Amino acid sequence: MKTLDYIREFYLQYGIPLIRDNFPEYQERIAVGVVGEGSDAFKYDDEISLDHDMGLGFCMWLKAEDYGKIGERLNNLYCNLLSAKGKEFAHKVFGEKAEGYYPRYDKRRGVFEISDFYKKLLRVKGIGLQGLLIGGKVYNAEECLLAAAVNGEVFRDDEGTFTAIRNRLLNHYPEKIRRLKIAEELHYFSQGGQSNYPRMMARGDYVAARLSLDLALRSALHLAYLLNKTYMPYYKWQRRGLKDMEKLRLLGDILDAVCLIPVQKGAWASKAYDPRVPNMEDGAVVLLEQAAALILSELNAQGIVSGEELFLEAYVGRIVEAS
């Protein structure tokens, strides 16, 4: 079980009675769950995650009028609950590893007004509840924040306002925006991995070669998320997220291999650089071509491009023109 599962159990055991006994008339108007920043909200947490930013707290989301009436009192009762039962519950589920494990009283969990929660999480200004329901400006938010806005789990939302915004965001970017982002990442993948990496290796500039590889890795990851219509999370979870994807899951294994391969200095010892012919003696070049083939296959399958050329820069202009 992940921490999110234990948070749900904590809510079922203590959170439901807290709301029912103190705010019976609001039970069907309070949305409850865990959404936002943190490995626990993504269900990516493990034993190492217990060293920081962990807790059994959950979120309660209210409309503005209800928040003004009961928000402060509800939050105070929630904090008292964590103080009284949180540590005890944590010791039960995490055992000895929970020594010093205290529930967090931070800005990620607690009681929130719905639109304020989304605006602060996405760091967008000048947008109200209706604007959040429509979308629009929220797509200007950093993508890792959009990923955090749709992760986790909603335990209860009878009224449905919080979930309506969540579902709107889960629809992913409008198709025009998605395709333009795909074109941009194809450019960076091709520039970093298929063009500049071999050029830098031929020059013996290994720092620039590494930076070029890194650019290709980041762009390949982003392409996987875009082609799965899923927001890419914070950088340390981007590779982990590939394991849950329907499409391009094998891409992760290729990227792992790129990261683990030794510096391919010997492959360029007696090799003249030719921009038209990939140096297949370089193992990183081989792996990047395999990555390009996987990406191209999915681009063709989705009807975004039509072609067999593995140099992915070739498709950038066509995608932009068609968008």
Image (cartoon, rainbow, N blue to C red):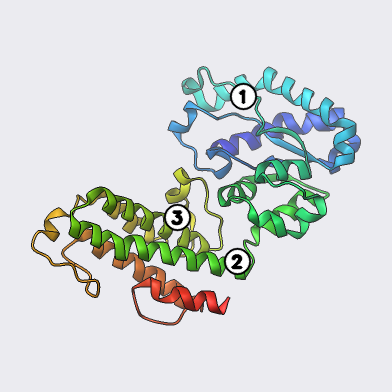
The answer for how far apart the CA atoms under marks 1 and 3 are is: 30 Å
The answer to whether 80 is drawn above or below residue 70 in the figure is: above
Residue 242: image tag: 3
Which quadrant of the view contains residue 264? bottom left
Q: Where in the figure is residue 113, as x and y percent of width and height?
A: 79, 39
CA neighbours of label 2 inside 10 A, class few (<14), some (14 to 19), many (20+): few
Residue that badge 2 annotates = 177
Report whether residue 174 is seen. yes
**Tag 1's secondary structure?**
loop
Callout 1 touching callout 2 (CB < 8 Å): no
> Which of the two discs, 2 and 3, sits closer to the camera?
2
Three-letter amino acid code at the position of disc 3: Leu
> Which residue is pictured at 70% across the width and 56% down the height?
137
- In the image, 266: left or right of 87? left
Q: Where in the figure is residue 87, as x and y percent of width and height?
A: 61, 20
Three-letter amino acid code at the position of disc 2: Ile
The answer for how far apart the CA atoms under marks 2 and 3 are is: 22 Å
